[in-house]
Image: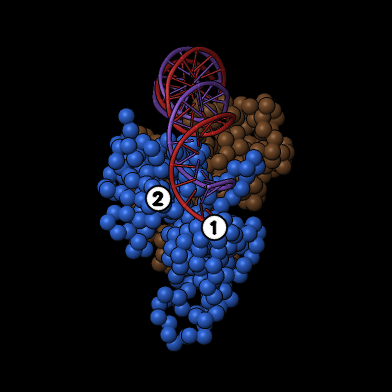
Chain colours: A brown, B blue, C purple, D red
Amino acid sequence: MTASLPQRESRAEIRLFRRHQHLVREGEAPGMIFCLEDGWACRYRSLSGGRRQITGLFLPGDYCEPQWLLGDRTKHPIVALTALRARGLPLAELAESPVAGSDAMTTMLSATLRIFNRQSEWIVALGRQNACERLCGLLCDIFERMRGAGRVFGNRCPMPLTQADLADLAGLTPVHVNRVLKQLRTRGVIELRARSLRVPDPERLRGMSLGLAPLP
Amino acid sequence: MTASLPQRESRAEIRLFRRHQHLVREGEAPGMIFCLEDGWACRYRSLSGGRRQITGLFLPGDYCEPQWLLGDRTKHPIVALTALRARGLPLAELAESPVAGSDAMTTMLSATLRIFNRQSEWIVALGRQNACERLCGLLCDIFERMRGAGRVFGNRCPMPLTQADLADLAGLTPVHVNRVLKQLRTRGVIELRARSLRVPDPERLRGMSLGLAPLP
DNA sequence: CGGAAGCTTGATATAAGTCAAGATCCGTGG
DNA sequence: CCACGGATCTTGACTTATATCAAGCTTCCG
């Protein structure tokens, strides 16, 4: 695709990051939007007392911070959660060049709106759902997004997040994440081991995220 | 402003709502963006078991759901938190007509980005801050937004939310909101009564929202 | 002036956090 | 290939922030 503009595509350089390496540091303005080719990343915020909350999760195929193209100035730090290969798309060129078959502005706008709506739902989860519901919803979202990226095979997909990562996503402690996952495993709702997630019955998992089948 | 287009402005009809009346119902597509001229509103989501989480608060002068102009299809219900006067701006016309001196698309895009960033920060609050920090942050945000709307006089602004509303915003129970507010009042951090909020020292309130001066 | 909505307070329950120790996994260097 | 060491996971005992239940009080609107 976009074979007519090879010189532009060539400017989109591939960059590699180690786990825990920052793609963007606090307050930094990298001037580019990263597209993840492989590996996972997140945006987060640190608080006093060593607290950390992840505010956005980026999976393979996702654009990191597409709203930058729309004029947003805010910079959350972005860090690699796994070893990572990303394509850096310079903002200056993006404004005019096509991406994935349509103009970049349209692509980044729809990506931003998707994230916007995901954020709204996550506010609901953090505000009003218990630990079990939140983790079921989180795993369900991850599973469906991985399916959308064509990375689910036989109800199984890669899941490289540690329990500490899940805790920083779900607003819980790692210890409590561990206990809830144990319950979910015991009840056969998920299989989660060796950086791999299997969901025998995605509908059931979604149901549990909505509090329809509370654990006794 | 926009005196050159009187016939367009005339299409933006003023509508009145009672408290608890819906501007937009679940899944409804009203085809317009409301601009609040007076009164407060919110978007929210309901969960099983009567749980409710407010995902966005709209103050006088705010546009409700500006992202609709950008192509978003998602509809959260929007409800009036007070008696309300709003100007309904039909999406069909908005796309081309100017609003507040610049083109509507630009206005709604920047409003959307502001909400986007506010949502990110609220995820941090709900995930990693305790009840006191969350309420301080919430009251601080409200106070500063009201100041921006020119509605703060002598460190005091209208605050028509009930403790139940604050609970649905902060992901707490009304009873616990009551207890925390009592502490804040006792320590002189806020004065809150008769639908009016006074913040003698906004810096101090902001500091408490960041966990810098925990209550003993 | 009556009644509903909202606020306040106390007693008790519970989900989740904290602390601590051991077990397991896994990458790295010898 | 193995051994080491740090990261990660697991589990138990105990604490705490917040929820729940219940009752009385206050405010304010019709």
On-image quarter of the C terminus of chain B = top left
- Rendering coords of residue B160 (x, y %): 44, 53
Give the residue at x 41% y 43%: B135
Q: Amino acid at mark 2?
A: Ala
Q: Which residue is mark 1?
A: B19
> Which of the pair D30/B139 is nearer the observer?
D30
- Rendering coords of residue A71 (x, y %): 41, 64
Residue that protrudes farthest toward the bottom in the picture: B4
Q: Chain of mark 1?
A: B
Q: Amino acid at mark 1?
A: Arg
Tell me, yes or no, if residue B159 can be seen here: yes
On-image quarter of the N terminus of chain B = bottom left
Mark 2 and mark 1: Cα distance apart in space: 17 Å
Q: Which residue is mark 2?
A: B194
For mark 2, give the secondary structure: loop
Quadrant of res A131:
top right
Pair 2/1: label in front: 2
